[in-house]
Each structure stands twice: as structure tokens, then as C-alpha cells.
Image (cartoon, helix red, strand yellow):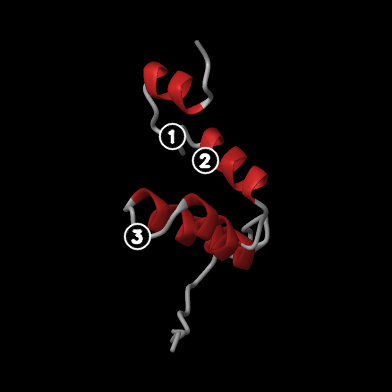
Amino acid sequence: MPQEVLVRVRVPAHYVGDVEKDVRLAYAIDLFVRGVVSVERAAELAGINLYDFLHELRKRGIVAYPYSDEELREELKLD
């Protein structure tokens, strides 16, 4: 049974952005980077589609799928 925890965070009054969205995204990215969840599950936790989540990872310099060139060619069945 999933359990939720309520966390209170003080945010400066001048913060620009959607705090809830930003925190959800940061949490999802952290879980993904630590290997706790898949990229698909992380996108779900962030509340965004997979394409947008991959874009957020790329903006932060985080590799979503660490394939070597050879592995990628094999996966895509390229000769």
C-alpha cells in the first residue's frame, strides 16, 4: 500500500515558478538518477509525459539511456 508523506518547505516569496511542479520534477529526477525508478516511472511521478521528462533530463545534462554506440546500433538494428 503506497504511503505518502507531507513535507513542508519554506520558499522565498520572490520565487518564480510553480513550486509544486518543480518539487515533483526534482524528486522524480533524484529517484531516477539514484536508480530507484525507471525513466518512465519518474516521468509519471513528475506528472509529465515521457518526452517532456527526457527533455528535462537533457537540459540538466543527465543521460536517460546510457547506450554505447555499438549497443545503440544493435538496439535499433542498424548495420
Q: Quadrant of the N terminus?
A: bottom left
**Disc 2 marks which residue?**
57
Percent coordinates x, y for residue 74 in the rendering: 44, 22
Mark positioned earlier in the residue sequence (3 or 1): 3
Report how far apart the C-alphas of labels 3 and 1 lie in the structure.
Answer: 15 Å
Q: Which mark is residue 63?
A: 1
Task: Say which residue appears at 47% left-offset and 79% top-offset.
Answer: 8
Which is nearer the eye, 59 or 3?
3
Residue type pointed to by label 1: Val
Which type of secondary structure does the marked residue at label 1 adopt?
loop
* Nearer to the camera, 67 or 9: 67
Q: Indicate which disc residue 18 carries.
A: none
Q: Amino acid at mark 2?
A: Leu
The answer to whether residue 13 is seen in the rendering is: no
Residue at 44 percent across and 54 percent down: it is: 38
Q: In this rendering, is residue 49 above or below 64?
A: below
Q: Are marks 2 and 1 in contact (CB under 8 Å)?
A: yes
